[in-house]
Image (cartoon, grey):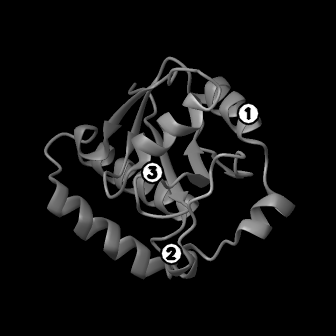
Amino acid sequence: MNEPALFIDIEASSPDEDGYPICIAWSTEDGVINTALIIPEDDWVDWDFSYQHSHGLSREHLFDQGDTALDVVKALTQDLGDCTVYVDGLDLDEDWLIRLFDSFEMELPFNIQPFTRFPPGLGFEQFLLYREELLQDHGLSGFNAENNVYVMLQIANQCQTLE
């Protein structure tokens, strides 16, 4: 039996290198999707208001409803530590994860790989087509971390049943 693949996606304050993680979603070994809003650390100040229109989150909402960055680091370490975790490769997820863990002088406890390394033979263009089709079919936004993890899980399941 194949071990379940783990997926992660992040929404950030801006698409720039000074951006930081504000929302994160990841799957667990039993296929559950966990999500967390992240309260910005004191030195995380870059905020792109035009990007806010894409993900729909405000800094105020993060402070009102979010978890501390340290609590998110602990949850990710508990759920994903020592595993390989796949990202969609559409943005700077790995950089934002490193920034999150660097805030506490910690190394990433898991290995990050692009999604297209998980299902054999699935190229990036084909992944994008499947992704767009699933998002449209389910009426989901691609600027939502939970939706993106859901889509990766669905594509992975489809690829595994074709093996």
SS for dot 3 = helix
Q: Nearer the viewer's eye, disc 1 or disc 3? A: 1
Mark 1 and mark 3: Cα distance apart in space: 26 Å
The disc placed on residue 51 is: 2
Image location of residue 156, percent across then percent down? 36, 48
Report the quarter where the C terminus lies: top left
Image location of residue 83, percent across then percent down? 47, 22
Dots 3, 2 in contact, CB < 8 A: no
Q: Residue at x 49, y 64 (%)?
A: 14
**Callout 3 amino acid:** Leu
Q: Residue at x 23, y 70 (%)?
A: 129
Mark 3 and mark 2: Cα distance apart in space: 26 Å
1 or 3: tag closer to the N-terminus: 1
Report the quarter where the N terminus lies: top left
**Callout 2 amino acid:** Tyr
Q: Which residue is mark 1?
A: 70
Looking at the rendered structure, the number of numbered marks drawn on it comes to 3
Image location of residue 114, percent across then percent down? 29, 42
Outermost top residue = 82
Q: Is residue 98 above or below residue 156?
A: above
The one of 53 and 79 positioned closer to us in this rendering: 53
Q: Which residue is mark 3?
A: 153
Q: Nearer the viewer's eye, disc 3 or disc 2? A: 2
